[in-house]
Image (cartoon, rainbow, N blue to C red):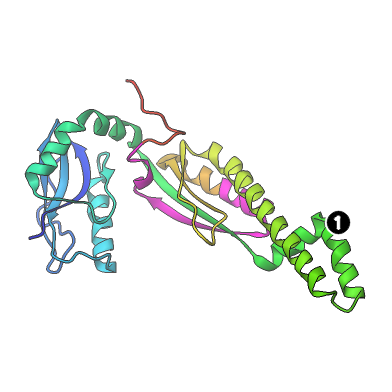
Amino acid sequence: MSGTYIYGIVSADHSAPPDGMEGIGEPPRRTRLVRGGGLAAVVSDAPDGLRPKRRDLLAHQNVLAQAGGDAAVLPMRFGSLAPDDDAVAAVLDERAEHYRERLRALDGKVEYNVKAQHDEEAVLHRVMAENAEIRTVTEANRRAGGGSHEEKLRLGEMVVAAVQAREAQDAVSLRRILEPAAEAVSSAPESTGWLANLSFLVDRKAAEHFLTAVETARGEHAHVELRVNGPLPPYSFVEPGPSEPVGTE
């Protein structure tokens, strides 16, 4: 065994995992509860050489879905490990107040992840339509049989700058449209290829309202491709972010 694998955290009065509920590993490890700090963690033995294989990713999600079927569960990301059950109990004791606050805040909530990128051809048309200087230089180069190397370079730099500016504007605009339909938002670290990578905390009962906002964003940004993943366990909100301060109740 390579330690204790943690799926999520629940309240102390949460019922034990259903008999025979299987988690990650091959063969699948049986899940159990480790208690501490008035809370409980849903755990199993951790297999050796854990890797994010499809079977284990699905098993992790399934355990969370079953654990959260009738009560709030604070999801841990795939690969969360502790040396042993005693270490898990110690963390529950140490961070009990924080975890209880998060369980209250996330009860009945799900996460939707929205990634956005430009349709290259569509955004170039948009940039050309919006920027008279780019149109002028493009036309001048065309009349000159393509233009000199310096002129081509200048035009390329102008287009790149305009596209980058449009990316920044679209990222702000998309967040402005979607954020009112959610209870909190978390921005992922910037990554190549996405002009926005946002996770939204949404009341499960208001999911249709959020998805309607997504369609509004699509309609207003025809040059942007939106990819929506959800509903998911609220992984991005286990730790409160700037837009979701810790409550004082």
User: Which quadrant is the C terminus positioned in?
Assistant: top left
Question: Is-magenta flag for residue 222?
Answer: yes
The range drawn in magenta is: 213-239
Q: Which residue does the numbered mark 1 point to in the structure image?
A: 132
Residue nearest the viewer, comparing 104 with 204: 104
Asked if residue 6 lies left or right of residue 124, the reply is left
One can see residue 39 in this view: no
User: Is 125 located above or below residue 110 in the figure?
Assistant: below
Q: Quadrant of residue 47?
A: bottom left
| Residue at screen point 43% across, 32% down | 244
- x and y, in percent, of residue 207 in the image: 46, 45
Residue positioned 75% across, 60% down in the render: 158
Q: Residue furthest top?
A: 249
243 versus 122 height, above or below: above
Mark 1 residue element:
helix
Residue type at the position of mark 1:
Ala
Note whether residue 121 is visible. yes
Across and down, in percent, residue 234 comes to 36, 45
* Position of the N terminus by quadrant: bottom left
**Quick check: 24 left or right of 178?**
left
**Image: 49 above or below 237:** below
Who is closer to the viewer here, 230 or 161? 161
Query: Where is residue 54, by image quadrant?
Result: bottom left
Q: Is residue 11 left or right of residue 229?
A: left
Pinpoint residue 107: horizontal percent, then vertical percent: 32, 36
Q: Depth check: give the residue in front, 247 or 69.
A: 247
228 falls in the magenta region = yes
Report crowding for label 1: few under 14, some 14 to 19, many 20 or more residues within 10 A (C-alpha). Answer: few
Q: Is residue 230 left or right of residue 180?
A: left
Q: Which residue is most to the front? A: 150
How far across and down, in percent of the image, does residue 72 sit?
A: 27, 39
Which residue lies at the image location 27% right of the left edge and 48% below the top edge?
Answer: 76
